Image (spheres, rainbow, N blue to C red):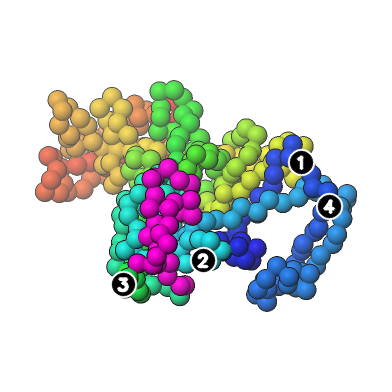
Amino acid sequence: MICQHFGYTNESVIQPKSNSSYPDACMHINRCSTNNMTTIDDIPKQCDVFYGSDYSDYDNLYKEINCIPAQLADGASKLQGRVEAGLFGQLNSICSLGFDSRAANVLCASLGYKRGSTQLWTNSYFGAGSLSIYKRNITCSGDEISLKLCSHSDMEIPGCDNRNVVGVECEGDIIKIEPLFTSRPYEGIVDGYHGDLRYDIVGNVSSTTAKTLCTMLGYGRVGFSGLPIPGRTLDYFKQYVICSGTESSISECVGEIEYCVERNYYHCEQRTQWLKRVIIFCSDYKIQGLRLGSDGKLLMEINGRQWGSCIDYFTTQTAQSACIIMGYSGNATFSGQTGGTNDVEIMGSLVCSANAIIV
C-alpha cells in the first residue's frame, strides 16, 4: 500500500544491515486491514500501531521498504508480460509507440534480470489492462536503472490507445553450480543470481525441481538432489523452491528471495543453523565418451559420432562399469527399446539409482 501510494507496483520489506543508523523514534505497525486502506492516513485507523521501541523484541530493527519500479503483468511466466511501471507518482501501462529496445533493456535491468530483453510486443499482446496508458515518448540510453530516469517527452504521442500497449520479455536470472569436486562441474551447491545479486538456495527440493534445475543448467532433464549441507553466513536466500518442470528460469519457480542481516540479528542466527544449501547432481553429462541422454539412453561418442549401445550382450556388469565411469556407484539396471529413425543403432537404456554414492 505504501509503495502504491507513491506510484510503484508493490513492495518488499527487508531488514537493513545491522550497522545501519537507527531512527530517533520507532513505530510498530501490525495486523493491517490492507483491503480497506487507500492512503497512508489509514494506517492508524486500520492497523495496530505502537509508538516507541519494544526492547523485548530480538528483531528490534527498523524496516526498509524496497518499492519495485515496474512489473510484467499477465504473461505466461514472470519473464514476460504487459509493462506496468510507476512513473511520477502513478502506476501506468505504457504506449508502445514511444517505447524501443533500449527502454525494454532498462526495464528488464530495473527488475533485476540480465540487462537485455529478448522480445518486444507493440500490439497489446498481453491485453491492455485496467490502468491508464502512459502516452509520452520514453528515450533511454540503456544505462539508466529505471524508466523514470530516462528522458520523457513533454507532449503525448498521438494514436496511443488500448490497441498498442507494450509488452516485454526479459532474459531470465540464472543459477550456477559451485562444484563439490573440481573435475565435476555437473554436481554441487546451487547458487542463484538475480541481476547483480547473488543468493543462496536453501532447504530440501523435490526430484522434479532438481531435474528442472539441471535442465536450466544445460545438463538435460536428468538429475537428483542430495542432502542439503550447511552454508556460509546467509545474506540473501531463497527457500521452499518448487519447480513444476516446465520453467526455463528459476524466477518462474515458486519461491521468493528473502534477506537476512548480519550475525548479531537473533532470528538470522537461528535461521543459519537450520537453513541448508541445496546440492544437486546432474547426470546428463559426457565423461570419457559416455553420456546419459535425457530419456535414459546410454550414448557414446566415437570418432566424433554419437552411437547408442546395442542391447545384445549388454550385461549388468557393463551397466555397472558405465555408471562408475560417469561418477556413480550402486546397483545399475537397464532395459532395451527399439531405436528411432534418427538412431544409428538399436539403443540400450541405462538407469543409475538416484541414491547412488558419488565416487
Q: Residue furthest front?
A: 154
Disc 2 residue type? Leu
Q: Nearer the viewer, residue 176 or 128?
A: 128
CB under 8 Å between discs 3 and 2: no
Name the element at disc 4: loop
Magenta-drawn segment? 131-157
Q: Quadrant of the N terminus?
A: bottom right
What residue lies at 50% left-to-right and 39% top-to-bottom?
Answer: 196
Q: Is residue 263 visible?
A: yes
Q: Residues within 10 Å of mark 3 (few under 14, many from 20)?
A: few
Residue 294 image-quadrant placement: top left
Choose the circle earlier in sequence order: 3 or 4: 4
Please name the residue that numbered disc 4 is placed on.
25
Q: Which mark is residue 91?
A: 2
- Mark 3 → mark 4, Cα distance in angstroms: 51 Å
- Mark 4 → mark 2, Cα distance in angstroms: 31 Å
Please name the residue that numbered disc 1 is placed on.
21
Query: Left of 109 or right of it: where is 198?
Result: right
- Mark 3 → mark 1, Cα distance in angstroms: 50 Å
Residue 142: x percent and y percent? 39, 45
CB under 8 Å between discs 4 and 1: no
Q: Residues within 10 Å of mark 1 (few under 14, many from 20)?
A: few
Tag nearer the camera, 3 or 4: 3
Please name the residue that numbered disc 3 is placed on.
159
Name the element at disc 2: strand
Residue 134: x percent and y percent? 43, 67
What residue lies at 28% left-to-right and 24% top-to-bottom?
Answer: 288
